[in-house]
Amino acid sequence: MTRLLIVEDDAATAHELREGLGARGYDTAHAGSAEAARASIAESAWDALIVDRMLPAQDGLGFVRTLRERGDTVPVLFLTALGTVDDRIEGLRAGGDDYLVKPFALGELVARIEALLRRPAMGMRPLLRIGSVELDLIARTARRGERDLELLPREFQLLEYFMRREGLVVTPAMLLRDIWNYNFELRSNLVDVQLGRLRRKLDALGETRLITNVRGVGFVFRADT
């Protein structure tokens, strides 16, 4: 069973994370400070760490930087409310492997953990490639063939979600639950509007349409090469 250490000073947030990840089959533990996390790491082996940046005494950046200086290569996902571009850059430069901003959808968190656990050797960038489309999951950049895709954060998130389910039907209910964290039926055209924006950037004139409608059911992403 995959073992995750949650380094988070807010007990309520840590409890929610443990409940949600436990229901997905992960074995989790909680450390409320950098000092407690170091003690847990010294006692046990962890498959990945989920780290808040705003910790008491030593912050998350300093904690992860110290781990890397010691040569510890355990995958680290920063999970924090600090979400500017500069914040993300600081987290990645401190040694984080990925960066997710609160509030977040549990489905996205799980997908990112799965990506971290599949990552190649230290120093290589985690890339997701399906057909002609390539996502850099750290830099949060996207390309189709030789063309850069200027995606907004939600559009990037949607494209990653579809690519991880290549060939499978994705329903609007799945998107509302896993992307927008709505656990109830939402009577609006939110999904259609967001997908329309993504498609206009993803499919240039003459290119194969990658995300197609499945009438009465949902949508499906299929590789073009």
Image (cartoon, helix red, strand yellow):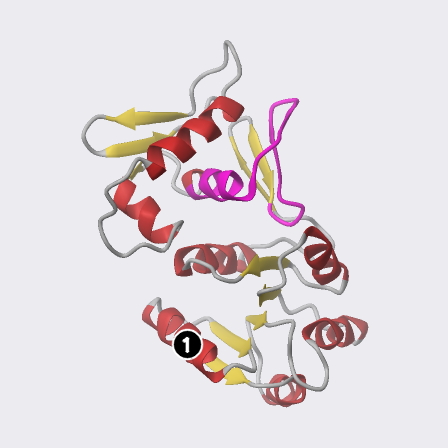
Compare residues 213 and 129 and report the one nearer the observer.
213
Q: In the rendered view, would you say 26 is above or below 10?
A: above
Kind of residue sitting beneath label 1 = Arg
Residue 127 visible in rendering: yes
Occupied quadrant, residue 68: bottom right
Label 1 residue SS: helix
Image vertical order of residue 105 relative to residue 140, above or below: below
Q: Is residue 89 magenta?
A: no
How far across and how far down the image is residue 191, in percent? 35, 37
Disc 1: CA contacts within 10 A as few (<14), some (14-19) or many (>=20): many
Q: Which of the image's four quarters has the N terminus?
A: bottom left
Residue lying at 60% horizontally and 72% vertically, measured from the top left: 52
Q: Which residue is mark 1?
A: 18
Between 62 and 68, which is closer to the camera in this rendering?
62
Percent across and percent down for residue 51 are 60, 72
Comparing 118 with 7, the one in front is: 7
Question: Could you tell me residue 20's position as x and y percent?
Answer: 37, 70
Residue 223 appears anywhere in the view: no
Query: Magenta residues?
Result: 137-161
Q: Specify whether 175 is left or right of 12.
A: left
Q: Where does residue 209 sit, x and y in percent of width and height?
A: 42, 19
Q: Is residue 138 magenta?
A: yes
Q: Indicate left or right for 180 with 151 as reference.
A: left
Q: Is residue 188 left or right of residue 106?
A: left
Which residue occupies 40% across, 75% down? 16
Residue sticking out furthest to the top: 206
Query: Would residue 152 be found to the left or right of residue 84 on screen?
Result: left
Residue placed furthest toward the left: 216
